[in-house]
Image (cartoon, rainbow, N blue to C red):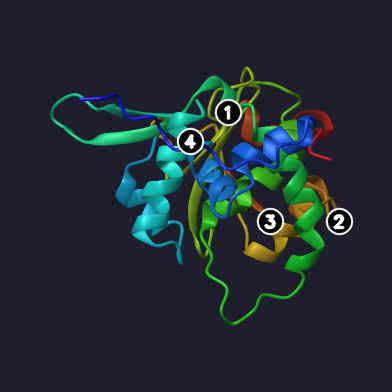
Amino acid sequence: MPRQTPPRRRSYDQYCATSRALDAVGDRWALLIVRELLGGPRRYTDLLADLPGVSTDMLATRLRDMERDGLAVRRRLPAPANASVYELTERGAGLLPVLRALATWGAPDLAERRPTDAVRAHWFAIPLLGPLGAACGGDRVLVEVELPEGLFHIRTGLAPGRPSYGDGAADTAPDARLVMDADTCRALGEGTATLAEAVKEGRVRVRGEGAAARRLRGEDGGGSAA
């Protein structure tokens, strides 16, 4: 039986770095799948739940494309989980700066939430990475962020390529927890407010008693949360 040749990837057929990048991640849903996987390994059902509007066929197709292009891999978790998860390769994880730049560029369009807009708390994580990392002075700090829409966590000071955020509570005790609403979180991510200002105004509550929490509250000699 002759060996089947895999279908040719659609291409812009342009000798251009931007064109090559769009060949790999320019299709609909591709970068949003990357957004989910940047938070760590996810099961297919998790991806389906956190990508409202995607069809099962489209999700399966995009994941196959990402495996083929070396952006993601699928692996089996050991017992007792016995489930398959998808995770980014090093090349796939390298798209984090791209997602951060897109989030910055698109932030002004979030000024008004549309009635049809779905929302997940961890979607606010990427814009918050820079401001929170700066507030923590580049140190390795684990922070949970609590919004009315849900909970996510951010790890600052990690080496490039390691998951720096995730959905839900962290798997270890956090150094601090920030409690705020989505509008405040958006303002922090956009840079129209600083964490120091938001804490002082009572828009952000910082829970925790360790050094990181005190620093984020602006204690211990005048914190660097600005």
Residue 76 position in % (x across, y down): 24, 27
Q: Which part of the image, by quadrant, shows the C terminus?
A: top right
Find numbered disc 1 in the image and state the secondary structure of the residue it sits on: helix
| Numbered disc in front, either 1 or 2 | 1
Find numbered disc 2 in the image and state the secondary structure of the residue it sits on: loop
- Alpha carbon separation for disc pair 2 and 3: 10 Å
Q: Quadrant of residue 117?
A: bottom right
Q: Residue type at mark 4?
A: Met
Q: Nearer the viewer, residue 69 or 104?
A: 69
Q: Nearer the viewer, residue 162 or 88?
A: 88
Q: Horizontal placement of 61 versus 222: left or right? A: left
Which disc, if any, is residue 185? Answer: 3
Identify the residue position indicated by label 2 in the image. 192
Identify the residue position indicated by label 4 in the image. 66
- First in sequence: mark 4 vs mark 2: 4
Q: Residue type at mark 2?
A: Thr
| Numbered disc in front, either 1 or 3 | 1
